[in-house]
Image (cartoon, rainbow, N blue to C red):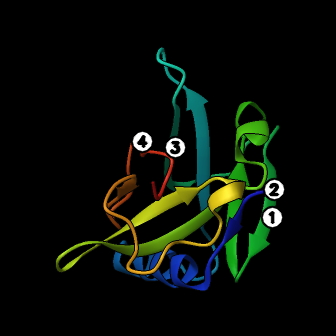
């Protein structure tokens, strides 16, 4: 299943704190789907658990994945990396790119405030 890097876990926990979410009473939903062009789109946001969700914890972060997203998220790593000068963002790395190249990524992420979708990660 999906894994978090320590940097991603720290930023998610910081975002929960900034959002005023109660201690240890929140979870991050991570979703994936395929758009009309065949590219995988990723999304994340704080949410409540639903009946068919896969619920698990990685690096102290409670994660939720709905059934439609499970196959697309298998082996994916969520990282938080530099995306430009003075900018950081989340990137979703497919299994073959689980180790980010030195210097981070220039595309494929979203801001720490969450995102509707993001690219495949480092290219």
What residue is drawn where x is 52% and y is 43%?
Answer: 42
Q: Which residue is mark 4?
A: 117
SS for dot 1? strand
Q: Which residue is mark 2?
A: 1
What residue is drawn where x is 52% and y is 85%?
Answer: 10
| Residue density around tag 4, few if under 14, some if 14–19, many if 20 or more, within 10 Å | some
Residue 52 against residue 19 in the figure, above or below: above
Q: CA distance from mark 3 to mark 2?
A: 15 Å
Q: CA distance from mark 1 to mark 3?
A: 18 Å
Q: In the image, 62: left or right of 14? A: right
Work out which quarter of the rendered image holds the C terminus and state it.
Answer: bottom left
Mark 4 and mark 3 in contact? Answer it, CB < 8 Å: yes
Q: Which residue is mark 3?
A: 42
| Any part of residue 60 in sight | yes
Q: Which residue is mark 1?
A: 56
Q: In the image, 118: left or right of 5? A: left
Q: CA distance from mark 1 to mark 4?
A: 22 Å
Mark 2 and mark 1 in contact? Answer it, CB < 8 Å: yes
Mark 3 and mark 2 in contact? Answer it, CB < 8 Å: no
| Mark 1 or mark 3: whose residue is earlier in sequence | 3
Depth order, front residue of 98/1: 98
């Amino acid at each position: 299943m999906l894994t978090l890097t320590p940097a991603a876990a720290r930023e998610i926990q910081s975002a929960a704190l900034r959002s005023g979410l109660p201690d240890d009473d929140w979870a991050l939903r991570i979703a994936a789907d395929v758009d009309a062009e065949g590219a995988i789109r990723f999304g994340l946001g704080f949410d409540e658990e639903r009946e068919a969700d896969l619920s698990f914890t990685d690096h102290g972060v409670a994660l939720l994945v709905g059934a439609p997203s499970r196959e697309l998220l298998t082996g994916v790593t969520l990282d938080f990396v530099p995306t430009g000068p003075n900018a950081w963002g989340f990137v979703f790395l497919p299994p073959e790119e689980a180790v980010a190249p030195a210097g981070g990524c220039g595309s494929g992420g979203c801001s720490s405030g969450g995102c509707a979708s993001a690219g495949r990660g480092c290219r």
